[in-house]
Image (cartoon, rainbow, N blue to C red):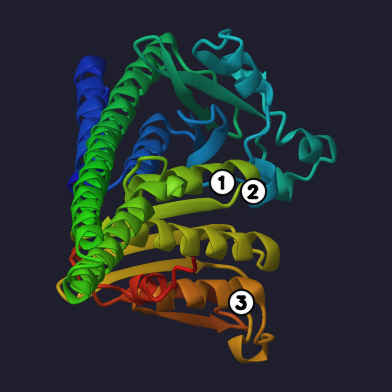
Amino acid sequence: MAIQQQASQADRSAGTSPHIRELQILNAIAEALNSSPGEQQALERTLSLVADLLGLETGWIWLKNSDTGRFYHAAAHNLPPYLQAPVRMTGYSCNCIGEFDQNALTPRNIDLIECSRLQPAVLQQAIDQTQGLAYHASIPLYFQDEPLGIINVASPAWRRLTDEELNLLSTIAYQVGIAIERARLADKDTQLARVEERARLAREIHDTLAQGLTAIALHLEGALHHLVSNPEEAQQRIERALKMTRQSLEEARRSVLDLREASLAGKSLVAALRSLSQEFTSETGIRVRVQAAGKQKLALRVESELFRIAQEALTNVRRHTNASEVEIRLEGKASGVQLSVRDNGSGFDPRAVEADRQGIVGMRERARLLGGKLQITSRGQPPSGTTVTVTLPVLEESNQPTEMDRVKSSDKVVS
């Protein structure tokens, strides 16, 4: 509300001083970028402010995934119907992305870049689909020399922006670039901490095995000395060695499970979900919002299984729904943690799904092995959509074994 009041105040002051108006606009943008709970919300608020303050119809933002280099549709404001179809907003190259990749994109006016994504509808004169849009202004996003993405804004009147407005957009792009880089640096700090934790676990495995094997060897050597003279003592030493072998094997297996979870690539669960959603959006055009609430301190193996559940849920969205938006929400509570994946697709009747459908079976099994449960709610008629929710009773990492640990520890060693 405060941001909208600032925007209205900026509009009212338009006739007083252009410089004061620019400062008010930049202040409103800065507050939007700093007060929003997530990157996507901040970009959407910024787009809305830019469109309203400059009298433009619509806008959208492309960002470049720092891991894969692929573009994804990060935010939008009032897209025309033709571009609301996810398939038309995938990360394939278009006029502005092509120029950006060639380092040839500079702040361009609104009638200089023809939107290649809108062109088929423009040629068919489908005004109801394009809302009269055909061109857009493009402002590249950078942080220092690092390319981040593109802001596109458009208007059906094809009004040329003034030099002052283009300069203002460039300044706004600079602010947005700083905000994006700040968020990514925070993710990198978290990733570095996790790399250090994995190194600690590796040292722990080494120490556990070294100490355990040394103790086992001592017990076996003692048993050898007593095989003839004191068979009962030898048997006791062998039994102690076997007990220590099982304990060392269990500790090593638990640590290796933590280290082996490569699906997160050293990232926190939230950062991995964001990366997954960006790649999904780039491939499908379906925009994914990732929300995190509360604190989630989870074992690496638990994070990995939750990630796999979210991954499978997105696969089902791609294959079986006509969704245009998805929300992934991770919420930590005093009683546990909850992950939900909700889409706005066509929905279905969960009771009519075959019991052996592997995607759903796999998600349920992963949830069960974590000691939790998975629930699927959906409707086959409007308002439709599907929500996959997994609830785990234990939030913080502890020494209490999950069902997965009990299954692993029940394995027998066959010699």
Mark 1 or 3, nearer chain start: 1
Q: Which mark is residue 297?
A: none
Reading the image, the residue beneath label 1 is 281
Circles 1 and 3 in contact, beta carbons < 8 Å: no
Q: Residue 333: x, y in percent? A: 19, 70
Left or right: where 77 falls relative to 133: left
Left or right: where 104 falls relative to 390: right
Q: Residue 72: x, y in percent? A: 54, 37
Reading the image, the residue beneath label 3 is 347
Alpha-carbon span between mark 3 and mark 2: 18 Å
Alpha-carbon span between mark 1 and mark 3: 20 Å
Circle 2: is it few (<14), some (14-19), or many (20+) Cα within 10 Å? many
Q: Quadrant of residue 51?
A: top left
Along the line of sight, the residue nearer the viewer: 139 or 222:
222
Circles 2 and 1 in contact, beta carbons < 8 Å: yes
The amino acid on which the numbered mark 3 sits, given as a three-letter code, is Gly
Reading the image, the residue beneath label 2 is 284
Q: Quadrant of residue 95?
A: top right
From where the camera sits, is residue 76 visible? no
Left or right: where 158 falls relative to 289: right
The amino acid on which the numbered mark 1 sits, given as a three-letter code, is Thr
* Label 1: element kind: helix
Q: Residue 106: x, y in percent? A: 51, 10
**Residue name at image x 42 percent, y 62 percent:** 305
The amino acid on which the numbered mark 2 sits, given as a three-letter code, is Thr
Along the line of sight, the residue nearer the viewer: 171 or 11:
171
